[in-house]
Image (tube, rainbow, N blue to C red):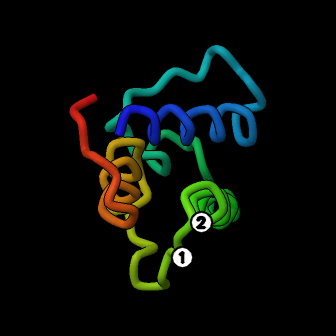
Amino acid sequence: MTDIKAQVRAFIQDNFLMGAKRASYADGDSFMAHHLVDSTGFLELVMFLEETFGFTVEDEEMVPENLDSLDNIGAYVARKTGLATATP
């Protein structure tokens, strides 16, 4: 799962934070609460997850429990793909 989170962190860093080094956040931090990703950004994030990991994010799966932090995304992608859920 660490690799999943690293890929997503790099995507967020490159696409939403424009590589800003000042924007540090923990794996469990809410993207919305920390203003890291806005509503349009979530759609981009969903497209990234689908293209990168090869599955479809269903409408009912677009909830904070799945997509609002690196921890949540790591667990969600692991469930969807069957990837090992090694501890970070």
Residue at image position (48%, 39%) is: 34
The reply to whether callout 1 and callout 2 are in contact (CB within 8 Å) is yes
Q: Is residue 38 above or below residue 20?
A: below
Q: Relative to 39, is 19 on the left or the right? A: right
Q: Position of residue 84 (x, y in %)?
A: 28, 46
Q: Relative to 38, is 79 on the left or the right? A: left
Q: Which residue is mark 2?
A: 50
**If you read the primary sequence from the N terminus, does the residue marked by circle 1 or circle 2 appear first?**
2
Q: Which residue is mark 1?
A: 56
Q: Position of residue 36 (x, y in %)?
A: 58, 42
Q: Secondary structure at mark 1?
A: loop
- For the residue pair 22 and 79, the one nearer the viewer reads as 79
- For the residue pair 44 and 54, the one nearer the viewer reads as 54
Residue at image position (75%, 41%) is: 15
The amino acid on which the numbered mark 2 sits, given as a three-letter code, is: Glu
Dividing the image into 4 quarters, which one contains the C terminus?
top left
Residue at image position (37%, 66%) is: 80
Q: Position of residue 47 (x, y in %)?
A: 66, 65
Q: Position of residue 19 (x, y in %)?
A: 74, 24
Q: Secondary structure at mark 2?
A: helix
Q: Is residue 36 above or below residue 23?
A: below
The amino acid on which the numbered mark 1 sits, given as a three-letter code, is: Thr
